Amino acid sequence: MKEKRLFFKRLAGNLAIFLLLWGGAMAALVWVNYRWCQEDVVQQYSDLPMRIRTGEVTFSAQPKDLGIVRFLPWEDGYCSAQLTMMGEHLLRDYGGQLFLRIYEKDGDRLGQTQMLVGYTGMTGETDPEEDSIVYLVFDPAMTDEEMLAALEILNGYPKQVFYRYDDDVRPRFTGVQAVGWREGEALYVQKLTLLFETEEVVLVDTQADLFPGQAPESYSCTWVEFYSPLLGRGDPEPQLERYRAMEAEVDEIEERFPRWEQEGLAYGGGRHSNAYLVAGAVRPVAVNHFLPKLYALTGLSPVILITLAAAVFLAVLTAWLEYRAIRRERAFTRAAAHELKTPLAILRAHAESLKEDIDPAKREEYLDVVLSETDRMAALTAALLDLSRLERGEALNREPVELSALVKEVFDRLVLPLEQKGITLKLDLSPVWTQGDRARLESVAANLASNALRHCTPGGTVTVKVGKEGRWAVLTVDNDGDNIPERELRRIWQPFYRSDQSRSRETGGTGLGLAIVKAAMKAHGGEYGVSNREGGVTFRVSLPSLQSAQ
C-alpha cells in the first residue's frame, strides 16, 4: 500500500508539471493558429464578395419569357446556383457558413446562395435529342423539413457526386429522373429520384406549384453533382437554422437600406454572425457569415489529443522510473544496512566478551572472529565504494590490456582454494587485446572467479576461456553446480540479491560482485550475461577488442 501511494504521489506531481508545460505549449500553438486562421477567414469571406462588387465575377439574368406572366417570388435560379457552387466550400474547414445575396443596380434581387443545388446534363421529355447542362434549384419548392430529409439522404453517401457505374456508389447508380420547370439553364425541381440497380431513392417530392398554369416536365440524366454549404458538416438541422438566421439578418438590412441610388455601406448584426450590405458598386452585394467560437482550434484537434496523450504517457513513465529508482535506492540502503548489521552485532558481542575475564584460548578465538568480521566489513565497504564510482560514471584509466594474461594472473591466485575444495581448473586462454581500465577488468575477472569458486560443486570443474569472436574479446567462466532458477537469471546482477539456491550468506561474498561486473561492463561499453547448462552455469562478458597493443 505504501509503495502504491509512493507511485501515485510521484504521478500526481509529474502529471501537474507535464500538463502545465503542455498547456503552455498548446496556448502558444493556439495563438499562432488563431492568427493564421483569422487571416484565412477574412480572405475567404471577403474575397468572393469583393470580386463580385468590382465586376471581376459577373452574373447575368436569364432572358425572361415575355409570353408568360411570371409570379416568381424568388430570384434568378441560374445565378443562385452559380453563387452556391462558388461559395459552397468557403469557411467549411472552420465549421462556418457564408451567405451571399447579389442585386441588380436598381435593387432587385438577382440571386443568393442556396441550401441545395445540383449540376447535371439533362435530356428533356419533349425533345429526347436535346442534351444540355442544367443547374438544379431546390430551395424555392422545398420546406425546411423536406430540405433536412434530402440532406440526410445525401449525407448517407460517401460523396455527393453520382456517375453511372461509379465504383464509389453502392449499389450502382444508373441515372436521375427529375420533374420540374425549366427556365433557361435552371431547372426548378418539384421531384427528383436517384435511380440505382436495386432501388430508387426519392430525394425530393414536393407539392409546390411554382409556375401556375405551366405544367412541370420530366427530365432524365446519367450523372449529377450536388452542392450545399450544409453537407458534410455534421447534423444539418443546426446548419439550416443558422442559414435561416443569416438570411433573416440580411433581410433586415435590406429593409433599413432601401435607397439603392445612394452609395454606401450598411451593417447589421445578430447572435449568429455579422452582416453588411454594399450599394453603389458595380454589383451590390449583401454578405453574412457564421463562425463557431472555437474556430481557432481548426486543424489542431489531432495535435492537441496526441500531445495530451504523450504528456500523460510521459508523466506516467517518469513517475514509474522515479518510483523504481526510489524503490531500488531504498532496497539498496536496507540491504547495505542489513549486511553491515550482522558483522557489527558479532563484533559487539565478542568485544563485550573480551572485556570479561575469559580463558586465554577463547580470547584468541574471539580476536580471530573480530579480525575476520572487520575484514568482512572492510571488503563490503570497498565493494560499495567501487560500485558507487562505476555507477557514477567515474573516468576510467584506459590502456591496452592483454585479457588472457590478466585472467591467468587472477586465477593463479586461486589455485590453493580450488585444490582445497577439490575443484579442477581448466584454462583455455587465447591472446586478445582490449582497451580498458586494468584495475576494473581485474576486478571483473576476480569477481567471476570468486563466484565460480563459491558455487562450484566440490570435486567439480571450473572452465575459463578467453578468445576473440568477431570484434569482441570474450571471457567465459563456467562452473559445475546447481542451475540458477530462470526467473532469477536477470536479478542476480542486482546489488545484494541472494537467491535461496545459488546465493546465500553462508557461501561468503559481499553480495556485490556480480553488480560490480555489470557496472564495469557498462562503463567499458561491453556486454554481460549468464546462462544455465545441464549441471552447471556459464557467465560471459564481452569487450570491444583491439588488433594489438599498438
Image (cartoon, helix red, strand yellow):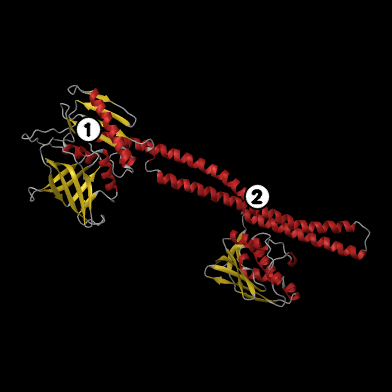
Amino acid at the residue labelled 1: Arg
Gap in Å between the C-alphas at discs 2 and 1? 70 Å
| Residue 547 in the image, given as x and y percentages of width and height | 54, 68
Q: Is residue 504 left or right of residue 273?
A: right
Amino acid at the residue labelled 2: Lys
Q: Is residue 267 left or right of residue 190?
A: right
| Residue 490 in the image, given as x and y percentages of width and height | 61, 63
The one nearer the camera, 216 or 77, is 216
Q: Is residue 386 above or below residue 8?
A: below
Could you tell me which secondary element the residue under label 2 belongs to? helix
Q: Earlier in the sequence, mark 2 or mark 1?
A: 2
| Residue 286 in the image, given as x and y percentages of width and height | 24, 30
Image quarter in which the C terminus is found? bottom right
The tag on residue 2 is: 2
Identify the residue shown where x is 69% and y is 56%. Answer: 385
The tag on residue 101 is: 1
* Residue at the limit of the structure toward the front, as seen here: 207
